[in-house]
Image: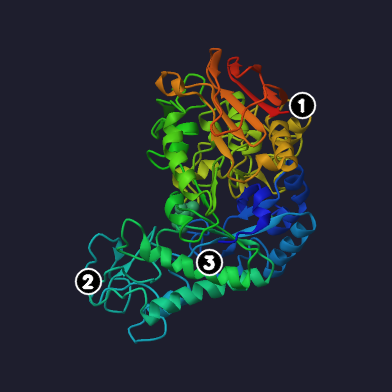
Amino acid sequence: MPKPKWLEDAVFYEIYPQSFYDSNGDGIGDIEGIIRKLDYVRDLGCNGIWLNPCFDSPFKDAGYDVRDYKKVAPRYGTNEDLCRLFSEAHKKGIRVILDLVPGHTSEEHEWFIESKKPENNEFSNRYIWTDSWFKRPQGLAFVGGEAERDGAYILNFFKCQPALNYGFLNAKEKWQLPPNHPDCVATREALMDVMRFWLQRGADGFRVDMADSLVKNDDVHKSGTSSVWKTVRAMLDEEFPEAFLVSEWSSPDLSLKAGFHADFLLDHENSGYKSLVRNYKIDWQRRKVVNDVSFFKKDGMHDVTKFLSQYLPWYEKTKNDGYISFITGNHDTPRISLSLDPHELSLAYSVLLTMPGVPFIYYGDEIGMAYIDIPTKEGGYTRTGSRTPMQWSYSALNAGFSTAPPDKLYLPVDTRPNAPSVAAQQAEDSSLLNTVKTLLRLRHTESDLQAIPNFELVNSKDFFDRTARVPFIYKRGKFICAVNPHTRRTTSIISIIGTEKLIPKYKKVFAIGNGTLINGECSMEPQSFGMWKIE
Ligand code: GLC
Ligand code: CA
């Protein structure tokens, strides 16, 4: 399937609008604030923005409970402001994708208000209702007793988020409609109508929330939900061939076959991605990380095969279909810095940003912003600590985020004495921020380091028999990358898979710490990363 060419060189920056930059001093970030910081995003090396939901909402789940898909939430600005963000971003070579929540709306959405009515109407089947208040849907979360309508309705996530009706695979009960029922088709059409609305106004695509959750009682292959996305993709290919669709799904083998251009690797239990940077438990009582065995941790397990055994089969299976998106984190995960110190972060970013696919940086991760222990806000719970205001400069009030009195801020700013900031890190050559910039500059100038599927593992076989499986060495076209997160020096013979014979001449183009690559032997000093170009 054709995919937008621009994705090959795309690097995204996720912006949580509440917390990026407050332009009018009311204590909450806004769209005008993002417009004012576009140069920052561009100079960092990101040419794409994923904006978390910015639509009208009662904010019981920070905007993932949409009340009106076609209206910007007044606290962020107006539809005109959002359209201006699109055009200003485009002038700077930045694309903007919005957050599409297809599986549920807010309980205050007008479709749901209609759907709750006892009289049959256009929206009666827009949500999933049982046919009697007495009937409880098996295995699905539901609410009963809230509507005049006789029935219980299904939830998708929180209580405030009734599930939209895309039908049931192998429907068993009368109230379970098949996905091709006209009312389920109407839901799908309504979704595409929302997409067209924003794409026509200049949006460049969507990050799709809970993308796997549409058709209920779906099979293991998610064939019901996948067929909805195939319809959506066909519409995009036809009407908006440059639009980008990336899924919150974390099963590229399913999502990329269903028509997504990219899928995030998330920190799900047993996920290969988790084993790299989030392989720990959190003791929520003490708010402490315990048993941290993440690959990039200097005292972790140093076992990259956990990651590879999940990633490689997915990569091989899907490399012609779409991209796997590595993230530094997102608004749902603990900040990556909760476990990794700044040096470990620089090693982790060196790998995450030199892998194939379309990478995403969560705002503030480029300076190593901390996970803060604060009370919940708008349904965030333990996620709230990853959503605090961007730290621009500590010589300004509220770290430069807002001119509002500190007690009026949407969320508090990190006030620890050594908290990182953009201003401080811009001034320091070896800062995390400058490391990220250097890596992204390299990525943009060398097509071999971009999204294209040219990944080869070049560790020799004996690597898999070791207990400490480091250094991890991979090749991307003309580049060899090696990382050793361990506190000990490690060496490995590299073997090039395929027919190509290596001319043993390598030029080092980027390094953290020291490493050598001589005659097919790679030797890495403790906690180092190296990238060589084959000449
Ligand atoms: C996704 C979002 C999360 C939200 C949930 C319900 O997981 O990333 O923030 O709470 O979906 O929409
Ligand atoms: Ca504001």
Image depth: mark 3 or mark 2 in front:
3
Identify the residue at image location x=47%, y=72%.
109
Q: Quadrant of residue 33?
A: bottom right
Mark 1–mark 2 Cα distance, whole angstroms, equals: 63 Å
Identify the residue at image location x=44%, y=20%.
462
Name the foreground residue: 383 vs 459: 459
Identify the residue at image location x=69%, y=67%.
202
Mark 1–mark 3 Cα distance, whole angstroms, equals: 44 Å
Which label number is shown at residue 172? 2
The percent position of residue 388, horizontal first and vertical second, equals 59, 43
Give the mark, 1 or 2, whose residue is nearer the N terminus: 2
**Quadrant in which the C terminus appears:** top right
Q: Residues within 10 Å of mark 1 (few under 14, many from 20)?
A: few
- Outermost residue on the left side: it is 134
Which label number is shown at residue 429? 1
Give the mark, 3 or 2, whose residue is nearer the N terminus: 2
Task: Check disc 2 and give the amino acid type.
Answer: Lys
- Outermost residue on the top side: it is 488
Task: Check disc 1 and give the amino acid type.
Answer: Asp
Which element type, helix, strand or loop, lies under badge 3?
Answer: helix
Which element type, helix, strand or loop, lies under badge 2?
Answer: loop
The percent position of residue 224, horizontal first and vertical second, equals 37, 66
Q: Quadrant of residue 416?
A: top right
Examine the rendered structure and indicate whether residue 186 appears above or below residue 207. Answer: below
Task: Check disc 3 and give the amino acid type.
Answer: Arg
Give the mark, 1 or 3, whose residue is nearer the N terminus: 3
Which label number is shown at residue 233? 3
Q: Residues within 10 Å of mark 3 (few under 14, many from 20)?
A: many
